[in-house]
Amino acid sequence: MNLAQLFAGLDARLPEGAGRVEVRSLAVDSRAVDPGALFAALPGVTADGTRFAAQAAQRGAAAVLSGRPLSSGEAGGLPCVVAGSPRKVFGLAAARFLTPVYDLYRRRIARFQIEAPPANWDGVFTAEEK
């Protein structure tokens, strides 16, 4: 999913040309960033996530979401998506990002039928595809 799809219709401003940047995962902790992740630089109780945007860039993040514009140095050279309410926008974007994953999971689970264990159950379940 690219940034334009992820933030379409949400209260967020994408830098020019950043709409085609592909997002492969989401992260709110810069230490958990995988290559291609959108790093949400959210304000926290003890630290502001914008302080860790450059660290996220070093770990391979594709873009940063912030409540304020970040300089190229602060963002580690990444495109910075700016939202008035970054926590709310991140939640909505995360729901949009994860919906296809959930739908795939739901469809795959629906394909299996698990029967109740017999009285002499040995502790092993087997699933048969319908």
Image: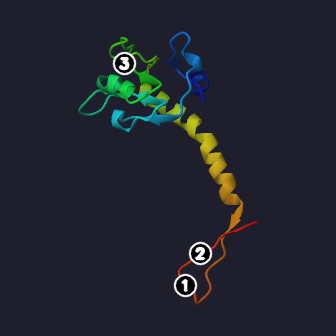
User: Which residue in the rendered view is the most extreme toward the left?
Assistant: 46
Characterize the local packing of mark 2: few (<14), some (14-19) or many (20 or more) Cα atoms within 10 angstroms: few
> Cα distance, mark 1 to mark 3?
55 Å
Q: Is residue 13 left or right of residue 100?
A: left
Residue 41 visible within the image: no
Residue 130, located in which quarter of the rendered image?
bottom right
Per the image, label 2 sits on a secondary structure element best described as: loop
Which amino acid does the dot numbered 2 rest on?
A: Phe
Q: Position of residue 40 (x, y in %)?
A: 41, 29
Front residue of 25/60: it is 60
- Residue at image location 57% in from the left, 40% down from the top: 98
Per the image, label 1 sits on a secondary structure element best described as: loop
Above or below, 74 against 56 in this view is above
The residue labelled by disc 1 is 122
- Residue at image location 63% in from the left, 51% down from the top: 105
Q: Position of residue 23 (x, y in %)?
A: 54, 29
Which amino acid does the dot numbered 1 rest on?
A: Asp
Residue 40 visible within the image: yes
Front residue of 123/116: it is 123
User: Which residue in the rendered view is the most extreme toward the right?
Assistant: 130
Circle on res. 125: 2
The residue labelled by disc 3 is 76
Q: How many marks?
A: 3
Which amino acid does the dot numbered 3 rest on?
A: Gly
Q: Earlier in the sequence, mark 2 or mark 3?
A: 3
Q: Is residue 83 left or right of residue 122?
A: left
In which quadrant is the N terminus drawn? Answer: top right
Per the image, label 3 sits on a secondary structure element best described as: loop
